[in-house]
Amino acid sequence: MKRCKVRDMNLYYRVGAERDLGTPAANGNPAANGGAGAAPTVNVRIDGRPIAVPEGTSVMRAAGLAGASVPRLCATEDLAAFGSCRLCLVAIEGRKGYPASCTTLVEEGMVVHTQTPRLAELRRNVMELYISDHPLDCLTCAANGDCELQDMAGAVGLRTVRYGYDGAHHLDKPKDESAPYFSFDPAKCIVCSRCVRACEEQQGTYALTINGRGFESEVIASQNEAFIDSECVSCGACVKACPTATLIEKSVIEQGQPESAVVTTCAYCGVGCSFRAEMQGDQLVRMVPNRDGHANHGHSCVKGRFAFGYATHGDRITTPLVRNSIEDEWRPVGWDEAIRTAAERLKAIQARYGRKSIGGVTSSRCTNEEVYVVQKFIRAAAGNNNVDTCARVCHSPTGYGLKTTLGESSGTQNFDSVMQADVIVVIGANPTEAHPVFASAMKRRLRQGAGLIVVDPRAIDLVQSPHVRADHHLQLKPGANVAIINALAHTVIDEGLEDEAFIRARCDMAAYRIWRAFISEARNSPEATAEATGVPAAQVRAAARLYAQAGNGAIYYGLGVTEHSQGSTMVMGIANLAMATGNLGRPGVGVNPLRGQNNVQGACDMGSFPHELAGYRHLSDESTRRLFEAEWQVALDVEPGYRIPNMFDAAIDGEFKGLYVQGEDFAQSDPDTQHVYAALSAMECVIVQDLFLNETAKFAHIFLPGCSFLEKDGTFTNAERRISPVRKVIDPLAGMDEWDITCRLSTAMGYQMHYAHPSEIMDEIARLTPTFRGVSYAKLAELGSIQWPCRDEASAGTPLMHVDQFVRGKGYFAPTPYVPTEERANARYPLLLTTGRVLSQYNVGAQTRRTDTVAYHSEDQLEIHPADAEVRGIVDGSWVGLKSRAGETVLRAAVTERVLPGVLYTTFHHPESGANVITTDNSDWATNCPEYKVTAVQAYPVSKPSQWQEMFRRFTATQQQLSEQALSEV
Amino acid sequence: MTVDSAKLVRMAEQIAANLAYTDDVPLVAARVADHLNRFWDPRMRHALVEIANGEADRLSPVLKAAVARLRGIIGEPAA
Ligand code: SF4
Ligand code: SF4
Ligand code: SF4
Ligand code: FES
């Protein structure tokens, strides 16, 4: 493959209609293919055309591949064949009757005819029955032009319907419009059950069933409830599967059928689903998951599928704003003035307080290219290394821990690898809420029989959900992660379950011996740690045996691992356990961080940490530094700069005065809100680049309007190191590309930065970063996505890491002493608060709160165990005051046994909840990732909001006034 | 830099505690110093050195030994 420029930009954007071959590829669902060898092929003739297809292929699929489309209604490539509609009959020479082509598999030498006069007659009869119970309002139907029933009536040449329309029918059934994003019109249902099967097979929620038999049968949600009240999680799989207008997007009903499509990547979570943005002119009609998407294989969740309304929300700011102090009104200005003002103020601060008095923060919501230019701007134009990324507060321990042990700061597998796992360990992650599309794949594998171990203080959905049940739920106390991972590893060594051959061949033996002695100490045994963890020793031992002996053991973990004072230690503990049991370097195993935001991996890869350059190379590495210095034509500072929390401390100290913030909302997302407020207030120039006047913008002096992902060209890198293209669907509302804003700011500061297109930024990244050397936009267009490392032009990427040897050479066992957090329950603060997210909202919620998704989650609630609630006089739905050593807030109670006695849980999607007013400034020892997951608190019934909340409301009202005038002028 | 020095000491002690898997003080101290050199802004290292010079008893023996090994960053070139 030759590195080439994307010559024809039209080709880069244009995609045709999605192909549907009717049944999945030979070995079941597409996700099952990860790493499996190719099946033997079978030769058949279809309508006279010879074709060779893999064994196990359906006749329908083979026909599609041979260019003959067999009529069908109940089959679609996304679902296993079902064989109910009888429209797909074919004639097979030497066989009696007419078998259904969707459920019949090819055999060697088979001769198939898809069209004969008899077949036509049979098919017309079938269609006649369907149409006799179907409204004939095609011209005004929302699915007109995208209805398979309509297509089939045409395809089989249906001309008359002999049965009257006045017999029994379903035509007057009422519509269900209760779900926010799609409608259900049972009058149009042909009971093909595609929706039911999509909800089971693809999504794994089992919200839909076919109720009744024969003519009476109908689709119902849960116990015949309205969709909004049912178990439906609004993933949209049934809507995509439905061949008629029965289940259809409300946006299509309102706007009509789309006429073109652009393939892009979801900007919400680290799964990184590929979508077709389907358009009418420059209007987005709907987002449909891309069947060819390598991370999601045609599936999606409610956020990526439906929650894009924020992009055109009235709160979007589309003109730059400036002001002198945060007490002043915002003044709308042109781009030139905004950039000039920003550059002048930053330069003035540097002149007065020194080169290191300013810095920048990159966002893991932004593209790789945007992140790259921000860190380049800080290092080259500001001349220091005060650049950090919001990944600091979520996955920085992953980087540190995996780099130390395995040699690369990333997960080891592709998502599809889970389909070969024999036992799945989920630690401190809640995939069904936070990584829903991956959770669906995981649940599919669990339904096939893989074992499941959940390590979490809370009974997350996976512990027990339809057809899924954890073998072990190690329900530990918040803060005891390292104790439990040590106890698991201790058991492996103690009971002789380690994979000696693997360790000898792949790991540093000197380090192993030190670790082995350490982990064998009695203090690490399940018995000795039981008190700290709260988990019975026998259960820990049983879980360790299951993981070590199942064959392929795969560990998935989330922020419940990293956001602790020992986050980095825990990540290393996980890697140790995987190495000790030989669970690395092949499909079905591995250590896999589930990344929160869409581009956490990418933001880290791009060198946004204060101590390292792109590709995780430390500033002290002379040859790397020289490489960048030569490319950038500037001298680099060799000392690490400030991390985000250090910036805040230094601001309060009066040393740090100017900050450029790319799409990041500290004032809501970072812990110890009052400390953050104080730090932001102490700065002289805060520049916020974002879609909305977010919480941080209330403290800003310059606001630069950014772009939603629909307005961007660039790339995101998901949790499996997959680089996927983000393509411009509409033009930037504020008239400026985000990467260009940064380049202009840099140029105005005196360091020239110019690119014609983000593909040139990627070319520069590839020149400077060995793991990206073979990446280019042309290759991305050709392959769809690329998993780094991609070390040269011939490489198509690397789905599995550490296959023959670890990236660091020999795997390193790092001793992991358990050091209890200082944040402990005591007489004053007897409860432990931990935090998390829900499916329908996204982090600080700046986007999802501005969509109809609020129908699912309109406020943050505090989960509390009935016993704790009762002694405090707290009842379900009442207001609860919450106090920690950092602050005080008020939330509404949800009394539930999901949490253990002594443990509280809340989400942080709404700023007025002030969840972070109570989280403290404790952090991970190695990376300063904040300890969101453990805060000692007291809870008590209250009747009014906390002081902080009242202050918040007043401050919000004032800031709103200060922006209103400015915005009404625009 | 004056920073909240209690917080600085707390963070440094946390590093020492997490790297202290053996009683071998010089070994642990070397690893702590290496960590501080690689990840801490020089101004924060400098502040730690000042604490060690003035109020050494605020630091644990391991941390004291580590601070003695910090890279020569004092007298950092002015901005
Ligand atoms: S939207 Fe998803 S969860 Fe809801 S019924 Fe359809 S497939 Fe099931
Ligand atoms: S709602 Fe659609 S997909 Fe479901 S059974 Fe009816 S026609 Fe088929
Ligand atoms: S799973 Fe994540 S990437 Fe996929 S659609 Fe949902 S939010 Fe987007
Ligand atoms: S498509 Fe084969 S029976 Fe319906």
Image: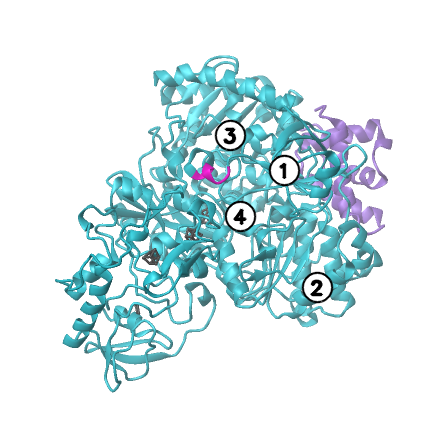
Q: Amino acid at mark 2?
A: Ala
Distance, label 3 to label 2, CA atoms, is: 44 Å
Q: Position of residue A55 (x, y in %)?
A: 37, 77
Q: For disc 4, does the CB lie below 8 Å from ligand 3?
A: no
List the single residue furthest toward the front. A167
Q: Earlier in the sequence, mark 1 or mark 3?
A: 3
Indicate whether A894 appears above or below A69: above
Crowding at label 3, few (<14), some or many (≥20) Cα neighbours within 10 Å? many
Please tell me the colour of chain B. purple
Tell me which label, 4 or 1, sits earlier in the chain.
4
| Image marks 3 and 2: residues in contact by CB distance under 8 Å | no
Residue A192 colored in magenta in the image = no
Badge nearest the viewer, 4 or 1: 1
First along the sequence among labels 2 and 1:
2
Do badges 3 and 4 share one subunit? yes
Which of the chains bears the disc numbered 3?
Answer: A
2 and 1 marks on the same chain = yes
Residue A422's spot in the image, x, y percent?
A: 58, 67
Q: In the rendered image, which quarter is residue A407 located in? A: bottom right
Q: Is residue A334 left or right of residue B38?
A: left
Q: Magenta: predominant secondary structure element? A: helix
Residue A762 image position (x, y, % from top left) = 41, 45
Q: Which residue is mark 2?
A: A544
The stretch of residues the image draws in magenta is A853-857
Q: Which residue occupies the foreground of this view, A865 or A440?
A: A865
